Image: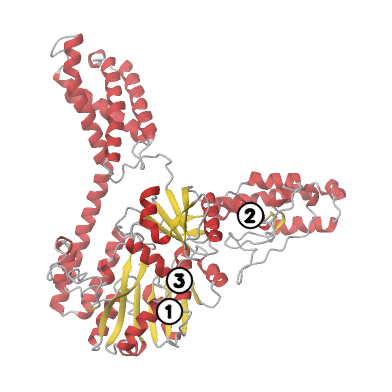
Amino acid sequence: MKLSVIIVNYNVKPFLEQCLYSVMKAAEKIDAEVFVVDNASVDGSCPMVREKFPSVRLLENKTNTGFSAANNQAIRISSGEFILLLNPDTVVEEDTFSQTLRFMEEHADAGGLGVKMIDGKGKFLPESKRGLPTPWVAFYKIFGLAKLFPRSRRFGKYHLSYLDENSTCRVDVLCGAFMLLRREVLDKTGLLDEAFFMYGEDIDLSYRILQQGYNNYYFPGSTIIHYKGESTKKESLNYVKVFYNAMAIFARKHFSSGNARIFTLLIHLAIYFRALMAIIQRLFRRIYLPLLDALLIWAGFLLILPFWERIMFEPGYYPAIYLRWVVPAYILCWLVGIQVSGGYRKPVNLLHLARGILWGTIALLIAYSLISEEFRFSRVMILIGMAWALLALPMLRLLFNRMKITGFELDIEKPKRIAIAGDPPETGRVRELLTHSPVRPVVAGYVSLSPDGEGPDYLGTVDQLKEIIRVNRIEEIIFCSGNLSSGNIIRAMLDLSDLDVDYKIAPPESLSIIGSNSIHTAGDLYLLNINAITRRNNRKAKRIFDIAVATALLLSSAVLVWFMKNKMQFFKNGLWVISGKRSWVGYIPGNIEDLPVIRKGVLHPGMLFPAQSLEPTRIRQLNILYAKDYRSWNDLEIVFRNWRKLDNEFHEIPSRPGQDLTDE
């Protein structure tokens, strides 16, 4: 066996599916085996692997054993001459394995190899090549000097940012997202250190490879996509603590006692520093907009009050206490109204903002009528202040939105303009998927793989993408990976990386369209919202419905049974439903691929269309709609309109390998 690919998965099913699809294509001409070690995922990852990738060796852990232990679990039973540790949120090119294996065979000194990685927008990921995190290197990284002086050989050692990203070079540390290792080297260094639960294990193993006299290489001859941060939130304090504690374990293990103490001190300083910064950032995010609103309203009173005094009264009519204490009280009331109304939620909703100002005004006028006469300065000024707030606060948000300041996106349903790149059958399937997704973008047209494309929605070929994006104002491109190779997709992303365009990949025969533009978000993907029926509340509602209907039917069976052709089956159905083995309503028999698992049903949604002969595509659509938008009322309608068929035998629906459809 030439290559063993090992992927550790934890609740990233859509990304794992795309990853495996690219891996299987890359391994077609190589003597390879593929392992998926699942750390107790609850998102349906394991059934998906069993069903769609039967040749993959799936190891299912009952608990989350951590990254190191899970990788070691597969390494011990693997037989490849080379071992590849690969993250599930990656996409490899078709020639990635052949290219990297060739490099390893041509360089006998290579103990490990990493490749060029890009994110979901085609941007180079600096962790593709890294230096050893010595105390000083860690200091430069922790306190931002590495970011300020990336080209410096002194300050840029953490990511070796002074080295060309397109040139092969020796590096100290390989990234665990793609780590190609020679088995004979692993036999000498030992496996991953399981003291590292997550993070740091790649640094530790890379260092041990160097200690054995081998070199680690950065190889840009192959590029992969790495959707960073799909399993973790990198900005969270918990991530900071886990990551830097892993660095402390590394220091205690490999550095002298003096250096280890210095490193550990830096680690603790970093944790406290990042914690303090996180607290300050969160506090600032919460209060900076209300503070700006308060200053803007107060400035309005400061400008309007003298004019109002000159027009209606005389200068100095309002005492100093008015601007110093009364107006701030007004402002506080308006801010509370905005907060309660949801005016500070993101994205910005101008209606909620205006509603909050109006609520605050009503509260002020009520309070005005109840307080002592000496504090009743002017109802008119309250109304003028309200008018100013209704004008100035929305203008502030519109200005920030115009300046594209993060967090000031307007809550306006403005769908993205999308182009779908692929062959007609697949682009049509993807377009149909988009119509069922929670986000419904505008499909501007199709990008063909050949110049033979035609039709009103044909925009051009893949080679014309830059011009297509510019002319048609395309904001996002969806690549159909069933037609386009991963290599071509990655090349296109690299060519277009200077454009403000998003990218997503639609795996063949999948209900997910994958993409990610930020290391902080995993949700930037279109995924059919078909899990509604599996939510706890809906499962409970469906079970309560089944029991209630079964009980009512059995209690009235003395009458109902005379309307049933198969009387014994009618009673059996009621008892099976009460016992929890079956349900009154299930899927229409047919293709239930990727749909949530539910109990087999006596009836199904197709019975609402008795006069129609349902085509397979229509059956599929009805099953999806039933799963994604479950309501007990729908079940009641199906039962009510088909009560004479409650003596039906249960519809047999092909179960997924290794799963019992009676389990929810």
Kindly indicate the quadrant of the structure image that contains residue 109: bottom left
User: Looking at the image, which residue is at 17% across and 22% down?
Assistant: 303
Measuring from the top left, give residue 631's x and y in whole percent: 61, 46
Secondary structure of residue under mark 1 = strand
Residue tagged 3: 22
Residue tagged 1: 5
Out of 108 and 332, give the one closest to the viewer. Answer: 108
Cα distance in 3D space between marks 2 and 3? 29 Å
Give the residue type that dot 1 points to. Val
User: Looking at the image, which residue is at 38% across and 73% down?
Assistant: 67
Residue at the limit of the structure toward the top, as seen here: 313
Give the mark toward the camera: 2 or 3: 3
**Residue 89 appears anywhere in the view:** no
Kindly indicate the quadrant of the structure image that contains residue 287: top left
Cα distance in 3D space between marks 2 and 1? 36 Å
* Within-10-Å neighbours for mark 1: few <14, some 14–19, many 20+: many
Residue tagged 2: 623
Out of 447 and 190, give the one closest to the viewer. Answer: 447
Q: Is residue 14 above or below residue 633?
A: below
* Within-10-Å neighbours for mark 3: few <14, some 14–19, many 20+: many
Q: Which mark is residue 325?
A: none
User: Looking at the image, which residue is at 16% across and 68% down?
Assistant: 156
Give the residue type that dot 2 points to. Asn
Give the residue type that dot 3 points to. Ser
